[in-house]
Image: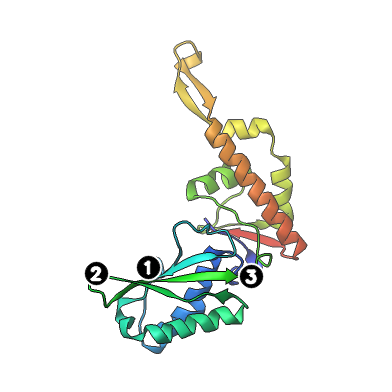
Amino acid sequence: MKVTVADDADKLYVHQLFALCDYLTVRALNPFFARHGVTWDEQFAEFFVPAPGSNPYDPTGVIHFFPPAMFAGQLGELENAIREALKEVRIIAGPFEPEHFPDGRTVKLMRIPILTNPNANSGPPEVVMSDIAAHLVLRDVLGFTKCKGIYEMDTEELLRRVESVTEEKVLQCASSPLRDPNAPRGVRRMASPVVASMIHRCLGELRNFANWALAHHHPRVRVS
């Protein structure tokens, strides 16, 4: 699930490769689609992704761009649009490197090396939570309630609850029932070290995010 500030949830950040991929989609590719009367659902297609071997949370590295098939003859125009979008945020990229399909003519992907990114400290700290982890931490550990598929809370309240979590609460939420003939009712609860470690990591990342949000005057946090 994605953690954002509620008052600026749609802001595009470019401080990390994965965020830069979203930025390029919105700033370079979407206008291109619109000019050519093409619609697409971003849930089912990602045209920009961090390349294998590049850390998606680093400010620099390599991005793979998979050109939409319908624009195979317009790669030069697409490359110019991408370079203009990068120029707007003062990011310098190296030469784009095409990889072709076996036919030797059609471009399968373009490698975009991001050489310098002066925006490394401009965005919020990352919070990495799967849907299951988010529900476990936000609902079971912190006691927040989801409304219409979204968790939203005051930043100060989020920080207060994170700081008040005890180790006993973490172990309780990390426990699952196991059969034990010697235990009352034949069942005892055992905490999973892996789940407990995940909870601690998520709490630490939420703490960092809340502190960042407060420092930048964002009163509410949204998880969706």
**Mark 1, secondary structure of its residue:** loop
Residue at 58% across, 76% down: 92
Dot 3 crowding, Cα within 10 Å, few <14, some 14–19, many 20+: few
Residue topped by disc 1: 45
Query: For residue 77, which quarter of the picture?
Result: bottom left
Q: Nearer the viewer, residue 76 or 132?
A: 76
Mark 2 or 1, closer to the camera: 2
Residue at 72% across, 50% down: 159
Dot 1 crowding, Cα within 10 Å, few <14, some 14–19, many 20+: few
**Mark 3, secondary structure of its residue:** helix
Which amino acid is tagged 1? Ala
**Mark 2, secondary structure of its residue:** loop
In-image side of 25 versus 140 (left or right): left
Q: Nearer the viewer, residue 21 or 59?
A: 59
- Mark 2 and mark 3 lie on one chain; the one further toward the N terminus is 3
Query: For residue 127, which quarter of the picture?
Result: bottom right
Residue topped by disc 2: 102
Residue topped by disc 3: 8
Residue at 65% across, 61% down: 124
Figure check: 184 above or below 45: above
Mark 2 → mark 1, Cα distance in angstroms: 22 Å
The x and y percentages for residue 79 are: 44, 82
Which amino acid is tagged 2? Pro
Q: Is residue 105 visible?
A: yes
The x and y percentages for residue 70 are: 30, 81
Q: Nearer the viewer, residue 47 or 92?
A: 92
